[in-house]
Image (cartoon, grey):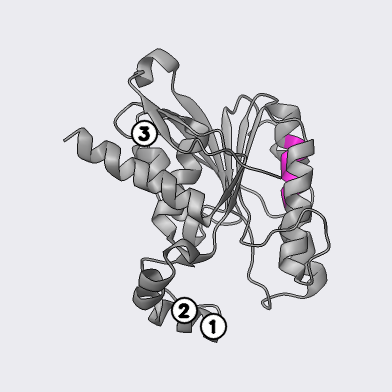
Amino acid sequence: MTTTNKVGSCTSMSVSSVGQKRLVIVGATGMVGGYAVRFALDSPAVKSVTSIGRKKLGILHPKLKEVLHQNFADCSALTDALSGQDAAVYCLGTYTGSVSDAELRTITAGYTIEFARVLRNSSPNAAFSFLSGNGADPTGRSRLAFARYKGEAEKALLAAGFPRVYLFRPAYIYPVQPRREPNFNYRLLRAAYPLFRALFPNQVIRADDLAWAMVNVVVGHTEQGQEFVTEDLVLENRDIRALVKSRVLTERDNK
């Protein structure tokens, strides 16, 4: 798969002239998903946010609707909740080593594919923003299980028939807020983040910046009410950073 070079352009079209969007977010209790919910609720371009997950968010907001769903291997019960949606931001996942290989494939690929099936039937015109990962391999030849399963999910999403699918492949995601890291490697990366960012900027991305990009490519607008356009299908870490940079430049120009 290839990407274009047109990343993050803005025009002066107002939010009201385009229409507010109904957005569904999966995995909102996670690191990236949590920020995605915050950005979506604050965005004037978003009319409603439907959060789908296994537990409550603990947030009260007039735009927010929460749907509790335990079995992502079967999303048929979500048919009504997913009807009439304009876009989806999918952040559900798990860490390598935290579950068995079979569970990793089920969560990473199986759940994604099943959710996409029901969303496509309920809202065929919805755009889809998917949290994949660095090195995702749709060919299935990678030695890394995580890369193969993320690639499997990517391939299925592209074949599902959505009008727009954006595949985000971040490298190391910096948590921003303190948290209990899942393993020693993540604790090490967090401690070394300032140096790592300085030496290898295209190998890191902040969780909040990633979430902002995932929301805005499918919503189509910045916080300033300008149209946000990207023609990229696959967004590697460098591309995500370019989107974030365009946001910073736009905000500066509007001050």
Q: Please state the horizontal and vertical placement of residue 55, each as a whole percent of the image.
A: 56, 57
Q: Secondary structure at mark 3?
A: loop
Give the overall secondary structure of the magenta segment. Answer: helix
Q: Quadrant of residue 97?
A: bottom right
Residues at marks 2 and 1 touching, judged by CB atoms closer than 8 Å: yes
Q: Which mark is residue 185?
A: 1
Q: Quadrant of residue 119?
A: top right
Q: Which mark is residue 189?
A: 2
Camera sees residue 37: no
Q: Residues within 10 Å of mark 3 (few under 14, many from 20)?
A: many
- Of callouts 1 and 3, the N-terminal one: 1
Q: Please state the horizontal and vertical placement of residue 180, each as a whole percent of the image.
A: 46, 78
Q: Residues within 10 Å of mark 1 (few under 14, many from 20)?
A: few
Camera sees residue 78: yes
Residue type, numbered disc 3: Thr
* Disc 1 to disc 3, C-alpha distance: 34 Å
Q: Residue furthest top?
A: 17
* Residue range (magenta): 112-118
Please name whichever residue, 131 or 171, is drawn nearer the observer in this view of the structure.
Answer: 171
Is 186 left, or right, of 134 in this rendering?
left
